[in-house]
Image (spheres, grey):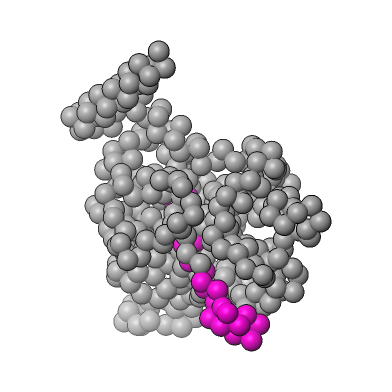
Amino acid sequence: GNRKSLFRKMAAHRAAQKLFRGAGGLSRLQDSVVSERVLELKQSVALQKVHPNVLAKVLRKSLLHEDKDFVVIDKPYGIPVHGGPGVRLSLADVLPVLAKMMEGMKAQPFHLCHRLDKETTGVMALGRNQEAAQGLQQLFRTRQVTKRYWVVTVGVPVPSEGIIDIPIMEKEIPGAQHLYKMGLSPLYRTGGGEEGGAVIRIRGNRDAFSAVTKYRILESSGSCALVEMQPITGVKHQLRVHAALALNCPILGDHKYSTWAQLVPQRLPDSILRRLQLTRSKTRHIPLHLHACELSVSPCPSMTKGLSVRCRPPKFFRSSLRRLNISPPKTLVPVDTERGDS
């Protein structure tokens, strides 16, 4: 009985896909296909509602590297690093449980060494002791840690690689009640009229932070691209702001920075919606496609062996790449052999 039911569901799914491809438009996109896609995307936030012990088990299973000083995990989507008002479950909450699971009931809690935003996935280092954690924190402060991220952009950046060096500061959105976003605070402007279009240096805002990002396109298809971004500085929302406002190519699933003056679900071209098998009203379910794929530290006095850990993107990210017909270059796909998810 169960097998017959499963085969019927699979046949119905294939028929719906075929119908969608033949129809060639969003207006005829089958409700069943869209519903299935929404359910799939909602899986990305399922961990927000679990018991702390369940999250600790997931983190243990996501182990990427461990040595005498550090444990490196693959941070899941939608889990904030720190607790706070309205936060039901954070990574910091489960560090004592994770340590006990890995090292026994007398284990001291692991220590946070750096932070990733709630919506960011990927490589995250934890210190087994306070001394190790503080040592790595110092290396982060002095920019001796290399971090690489993969993002899917809506639009293809021009030029295909470069360095973005534009300061960032927090700004209040005019007309919106208490809505603040990080925004660009350029040091140059283009002169007009008598200035003849010259590039003119202007006084920097004292509240702005220096923000530098290296980027390069790894692969593109249609109006989307897989882009590697390397933040040289560590400003809040730096990669999201530089992608959306400097390159004019917001990250897929970035509902905050895709439209500057409002806080609304990301507006996507029909061509992308068709590939993702979503209707416009369902774009709010698309998670942010921002993944920390690599963290490395060269050998130094405080870390004699150095550290180099890579991690492939989560399932929803890989699914989007397939649907968008983007194939990451084989030599760059991070492999984590201990993990079984496909």
- Farthest residue in the front direction? 104
Asked whether 144 or 245 is in front, the reply is 144
Q: Which residues are magenta?
A: 288-308
Does the image show residue 182? no
Asked whether 151 or 245 is in front, the reply is 151
Q: Residue at image x 51%, y 67%?
A: 309
Q: Residue at image x 36%, y 74%?
A: 162
Q: Is residue 106 left or right of residue 67?
A: right
The image shows residue 253 at horizontal and vertical percentages of: 44, 48
Toward which corner of the image does residue 225 lie, by quadrant?
bottom left
| Quadrant containing the N terminus in the rendered view | top left
Does the image show residue 154? yes
Q: Residue at image x 55%, y 41%?
A: 45
The image shows residue 12 at horizontal and vertical percentages of: 30, 21
The image shows residue 260 at horizontal and vertical percentages of: 48, 54
Q: Is 276 above or below relative to 244?
A: above
- Farthest residue in the left direction? 22
Q: Residue at image x 67%, y 70%?
A: 69
Q: Is residue 290 magenta?
A: yes
How many numbered markers are drawn? 0
Q: Is residue 1 magenta?
A: no
- Farthest residue in the top direction? 1
Q: Is residue 179 left or right of residue 86?
A: left
The image shows residue 154 at horizontal and vertical percentages of: 35, 53
Toward which corner of the image does residue 47 lie, by quadrant?
top right
Q: Is residue 51 left or right of residue 268?
A: right
- Farthest residue in the right direction? 106
Q: Is 123 above or below relative to 19?
A: below
